[in-house]
Image (tube, rainbow, N blue to C red):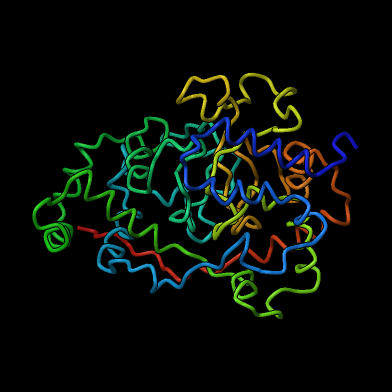
Amino acid sequence: MKYPLFRVGVVLLAMQGLISCQKTESAFVDYQKTAEEPYLMTYAVNTARTKYNQPLPDLKDLNLNSEKVALGNMLYHDTRLSGNGKLTCASCHGLAIGGDDNMPVALGINGQLGPINTPTVLNSGFNFKQFWDGRAANLRNQAEGPVANPGEMGAEWPQVVKNIQAVKTYQNLFGNLYPEQGISVYTITDAIAEFERSLITPAPIDAYLKGNDNALSANQAKGYQLFQSYGCVACHQGVNFGGNMMQKFGALEAYFSEKNERQVDKGLFNLTKKETDKNVFKVPSLRNIEVTGPYFHNAGAKTLDDAIKIMGLNQLGRKIPDKDRALIADFLTSLTGKLETQAMLPPKE
């Protein structure tokens, strides 16, 4: 084995993350603590279930504005937000198929292929930043981007605002919720963001983390132990099993060395132009990963087994045996949850 000591792998992983991101990011506090405990993770699997991962809160505890959620739901499914009147947010982030499109890259306006794999919108309110490169600080900022992106929904915001202003139902709803601001880019995206915060998917893992021993099968429980002991939890931590830090893809193996330039998105480097930020991406949430393939920002893994194998080698410097990969994959299915939200059709007027 090229890296026989897990301590080396985790410490190097932590160093890569710290180089790539500001030390002041609160998301790294728990990560640093985790990285300092490799032997605990390797030789004595955590017995306090919520030390590294926490269960989703109940929807009622998120204190969302139900009227904003309903408005955002309609806007999310409204073709008036696209340049050709045919696309919606749900075109790439389908709620019934895991919150993404199950394609290698997104299919945008007029059939344009996007440059990167579509991340899921489900549970995205728990991510510390949005997009693979973390360029959006929150869901409202994120909602602005695709609408005006010429390769995605292909609209222009001034026209979108006019489209929404022309609808009597929207006039009344925005008038009640935003009496001073009315219909604007800010209020449209604010409502969509509130709706997206409601898209949580409680899963068997949440019941297990709350103390229900029967919520996971025996193999899933073993898989979770391996998930911790191999060190997957060093990055896929917190309530979202990820989504709370940036990390270099290929920390211990040069994952991109065999890719051609067209296949390589440079991640955070696209924003900062810093060499240390090349191939640095937001660690994705693993919730609902069973139904959101293909995997990685470049769709480089078709199956969970492929993804686990690649992550073990490139992020941990470890070749994970077939049996262990199967158990980890079985555990990951326990993160598949149920979405209670139903799509609301936009006004027809």
- Quadrant containing the N terminus in the rendered view: top right
The picture places residue 243, in percent across and down from the top left corner, at: 53, 49
In-front residue for pair 215/293: 215
The picture places residue 88, in percent across and down from the top left corner, at: 37, 48
Q: Quadrant of residue 161?
A: top left
Horizontal side, residue 125 vs residue 38: left or right: left
The picture places residue 165, in percent across and down from the top left corner, at: 14, 49
- Quadrant containing the C terminus in the rendered view: bottom left
Residue drawn where x is 78% and y is 38% of the image: 8
Q: Quadrant of residue 314?
A: top right
Horizontal side, residue 76 vs residue 177: left or right: right
Placement of 72 over or under 15, stated as above or below = below
In-front residue for pair 311/299: 311
In-front residue for pair 252/41: 41
Placement of 245 over or under 151, stated as above or below = below
Residue drawn where x is 19% and y is 45% of the image: 163
Placement of 243 over or under 45, stated as above or below = above
Placement of 226 over or under 104, stated as above or below = below
In-front residue for pair 139/339: 139
Residue drawn where x is 30% and y is 36% of the image: 155
Horizontal side, residue 117 vs residue 328: left or right: left
Which residue extends farthest right?
Answer: 1
The picture places residue 169, in percent across and down from the top left corner, at: 16, 61
Report how many numbered discs are placed on residues in the image: 0
